[in-house]
Structure formats: C-alpha cells, structure tokens
Amino acid sequence: MFAFLKKEKKSPVATKRRISTLSNKDSSGDSGVEKYLKQQLAADNKITRVSQYIQEKEDLNVENEESLTLTGVAKYLETREEDSPVSSVSKYVARKTLHEKKIAKENVSGVEKYLNNRD
C-alpha cells in the first residue's frame, strides 16, 4: 500500500535562482548592510522628526518663560534676593554706632566745640 517514489532532482537553474534571491542584493549591487550604512550616513546630515520635536519643545519653553507673569511670591523672592538681608546683629551694630556718635556729641568739651565750629 505504500508507494515509494523517487524524488526528482532539482535542476541547476532552480538552485541558482534560489541563491540569487538569498543574497539580498538589489539592482545597485548593495547588500542590506550596505544600504543601512548608507542610510545612516545620510541620516546624520538630515534633521530627524525626533530632533525637530525636541527643538520645537525647547523653543516653546523659552517662549513660555518669557511670557509668564510673575506671581506675588516670585516678586517677593526677587526683591528679597536683591536686598541684602539685615540680621539682628547688623541692626545691633548700627544702633550701637549711632548711640556712640550721639554720646560723643554730648560729651564734647568747649575746645572741641570751638575747633569744630571754626572749620
């Protein structure tokens, strides 16, 4: 019931056709790797969509920063940065020097008054 059949041998033309289709060479003679490398070299000179998107996003951020109005807190912080902070120590030193000047004016002798008025 089983019939053993001989397989037909493939002709040499069929194997050449199969080998030529497996080589992945196109009409220019470039393989897939060569085509890929050429595309990569060409892509280095072109602006990709991703880089365009990133550039547009950066441009929008710059425009938004310029157009934003400052909040009250931001204005307050800017003024605090511009003014030098006054500490309680600096207030004490300022009061002490004023007090010393006031005492020095009160305790002036007659000769000192004469010399000061002469100038």
Image (cartoon, helix red, strand yellow):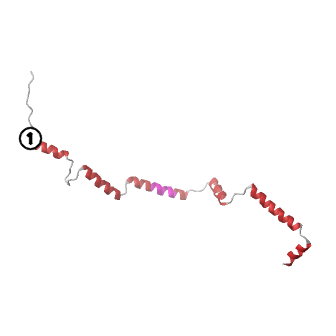
Quarter of the figure that contains the N terminus: top left
Q: How many marks?
A: 1
Residue 86 found in image quarter: bottom right
Residue at image position (14%, 45%) is: 17
Residue 72 found in image quarter: bottom right
Give left or right: position of 24 versus 95.
left
Quarter of the figure that contains the C terminus: bottom right
> What range is drawn magenta here?
56-63
Residue furthest to the bottom in view is 118
Q: Position of residue 26 (x, y in %)?
A: 20, 51
The overriding secondary structure of the stretch rendered in magenta is helix
Residue furthest to the right in view is 110
Q: Position of residue 2 (x, y in %)?
A: 9, 23
107 is higher (above) or lower (below) than 19: below
Residue at image position (65%, 60%) is: 82
Residue at image position (13%, 42%) is: 15
Residue furthest to the top in view is 1
* Residue with the mark numbered 1: 11
119 is higher (above) or lower (below) than 108: below
Residue at image position (75%, 58%) is: 90
Q: Position of residue 16 (x, y in %)?
A: 13, 45
Instruction: Please name the amino acid that badge 1 sits on.
Output: Ser
Q: Give whichever of 72, 7 is nearer the camera.
A: 7
Which class describes the residues within 10 Å of circle 1: few (<14), some (14-19), or many (20+)? few
Give left or right: position of 19 versus 50.
left
Would residue 77 be counted in the magenta stretch?
no
Would residue 62 be counted in the magenta stretch?
yes
Q: Secondary structure at mark 1?
A: loop
Q: Give whichever of 59, 10 is nearer the camera.
A: 10
